[in-house]
Image (cartoon, rainbow, N blue to C red):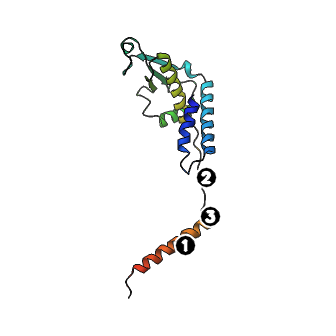
């Protein structure tokens, strides 16, 4: 289901001419691969949950059941992350990590505690994958000969137009 949501979001991006679908699909496959690699590490042993009453609609249910879920992950105390990965998480997610060094994710969109817990776990893995994704190095390119000639031609045309604006001497 999550993959379909990501694909639908990517279809809207693909309308822009700078993106093509093959490139976007490749990025998505790398992202999904990162999530599966992270899930294989089994972070559930280092994640703690705290529940409380959720705000918003829910009728009588909202006053009785603790449906809001807070996922807490201690980045500094994690045995599953390397020092480099911990540094990257702190660098890329500074607004999500509190003063105690815990990554905090709150889920309260559903009326069920189990669905909110699953949503929080899924968002945790997505955040981790986005933060730990390796940065693609930019390959420097040079303008082609045709592009250079076109640029010079346009400059000469602009100069000609400006020279015609001058008063004759």
- Which corner quadrant of the image does residue 145 belong to? bottom right
Rendered residue at 44%/34% (across/down): 94
- SS for tag 1? helix
Q: Residue furthest bottom?
A: 169
Front residue of 40 and 156? 156
Q: Position of residue 107 (x, y in %)?
A: 45, 23
- SS for tag 2? loop
- 112 w.r.t. 91: above or below: above
Give the alpha-carbon distance from disc 1 to disc 3, as whole Å: 14 Å
Can I make out residue 27 in this image?
yes
Residue bearing mark 1: 153
- Which corner quadrant of the image does residue 29 belong to? top right
Rendered residue at 59%/42% (across/down): 24
Residue bearing mark 3: 144
Q: Quadrant of the N terminus?
A: top right
- The 10 Å Cα crowd at callout 3, few under 14, some 14 to 19, many 20 or more, is few
Of mark 2 and mark 1, the one earlier in the sequence is: 2
- SS for tag 3? loop
Give the alpha-carbon distance from disc 2 to disc 3, as whole Å: 15 Å
Dot in front, 2 or 3 = 3
Residue bearing mark 2: 139
Can I make out residue 77 in this image?
no
Give the alpha-carbon distance from disc 2 to disc 1, as whole Å: 28 Å
């Amino acid at each position: 289901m999550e993959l379909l949501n990501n694909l639908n979001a990517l279809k809207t991006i693909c309308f822009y001419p700078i993106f093509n679908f093959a490139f976007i699909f490749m990025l998505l496959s790398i992202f999904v691969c990162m999530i599966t690699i992270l899930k294989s590490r089994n972070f559930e042993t280092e994640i703690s949950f705290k529940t409380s009453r959720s705000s918003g609609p829910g009728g009588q249910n909202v006053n009785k059941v603790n449906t809001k879920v807070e996922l807490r992950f201690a980045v500094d105390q994690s045995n599953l992350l390397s020092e480099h990965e911990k540094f990257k998480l702190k660098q890329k997610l500074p607004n999500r990590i509190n003063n105690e060094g815990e990554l905090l994710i709150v889920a309260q969109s559903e009326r069920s505690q189990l669905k909110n817990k699953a949503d929080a776990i899924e968002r945790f893995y997505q955040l981790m994958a986005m933060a730990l994704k390796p940065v693609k190095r930019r390959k420097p390119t040079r303008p082609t000969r045709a592009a250079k000639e076109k640029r010079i031609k346009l400059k000469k045309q602009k100069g000609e137009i400006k020279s015609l604006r001058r008063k004759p001497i």
